[in-house]
Image (spheres, rainbow, N blue to C red):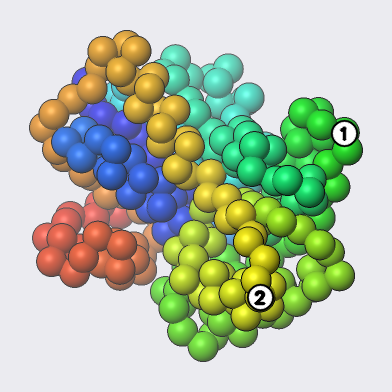
Amino acid sequence: MNGIGIFDSGVGGLTVLKAMIDLLPEENYIYYCDAKNLPYGEKSPEQIRKLSYESFKIFEKNKVKASIIACNTATTYSEAYLKTKFNFPILGVVSSGVMEGFKNSKNKKIALIATKATVEGQVYQDQLKKLDPSFEIRALACPDLVTAIEMGHVDDKKVEEIIKKYLDQLEDFDYDTLILGCTHFPLALGKIKEYLKNKKEGEKINLIDPALETAKSMKDFLKSRNIIEKNKNIKFLTSGEDSQLREMVGKLFGQEFANKIQIEIIN
Ligand code: DGL
């Protein structure tokens, strides 16, 4: 068996890879990002489906035993479709985000920040409303936040200004829960927390990162099938530049690790 495939359009899925490694440090992983085609969030449903399918072909070729669509945009438009096309198990990130939002919100007012496509796809909104129709959800597309983070701005003035530009638009909404509905966003968690601390002084805002529960579900699944491996191998593949991926791997996993990894560029 060849490990767990983790797919995103860019570096965002590394937050899911990290959550998985925290839970199963000795497992085998294949991380693939379709960086050449980022941002998925600005594409049509058909394009997103096609690109996700082509990306999952790479996992099929690598004979993964299970996989995670570590991208909310791809999950929104392709989860059901990919499940009809491939034989290995596929887990998306949206359901975990929905469940966590549902469980944590007390005032039933949830803000969702995501890509334009995820917001327009309405899956978060529909699934939350299905669980409880009295939920109020305000969804905000944050395209500039994706691009800035993809370019490595996770902890600087630039990302701080972009976070402010978007989250200020929610000023009139009394949310107690904020779902980070794009896997890129937890990479700027420090700055998002800082904004909320200053803006929503004294209020406790639940920050939902769907990666954490998704990783737990994957661990439970592997355990139930008794297919956890212990050879600790991580393969990195990208359709874009390796430098951006390496830089973010360094920020998340340490520079020493990032210098050592091989990144295969797929054309
Ligand atoms: N990381 C992706 C997500 O969770 C979005 C990035 C993109 O727009 O390609 O939606």
Would you call the spot at circle 1 few (<14 residues within 10 Å), some (14-19), or many (20 or more)?
few
The reply to whether residue 184 is visible in this rendering is yes
| Disc 1 + disc 2, Cβ < 8 Å | no
Tell me which amino acid carries mark 2. Glu
Would you call the spot at circle 2 few (<14 residues within 10 Å), some (14-19), or many (20 or more)?
few
Gap in angstroms between the C-alphas marked 1 and 2? 29 Å
Residue 42: x and y, percent?
Answer: 69, 58
Q: Which residue is mark 2?
A: 201
Disc 2 is placed on an element classified as loop
Total labels: the figure holds 2
From the viewer's perspective, is residue 215 above or below residue 12?
above
Q: Nearer the viewer, mark 1 or mark 2?
A: 2
Q: Left of 193 or right of it: where is 14? A: left
Q: Which residue is mark 1?
A: 133
Q: Residue at x 54, y 76 (%)?
A: 194
Q: Residue at x 77, y 28 (%)?
A: 131
Residue 265: x and y, percent?
Answer: 30, 54
From the viewer's perspective, is residue 266 above or below residue 61?
below
The reply to whether residue 42 is visible in this rendering is no
Give the image quarter of residue 223.
Answer: top left
Q: Residue at x 70, y 46 (%)?
A: 105
Quadrant including the N terminus: top left
Give the image quarter of residue 113.
Answer: bottom right
Q: Left of 78 or right of it: where is 217? A: left
Q: Left of 256 or right of it: where is 86? A: right
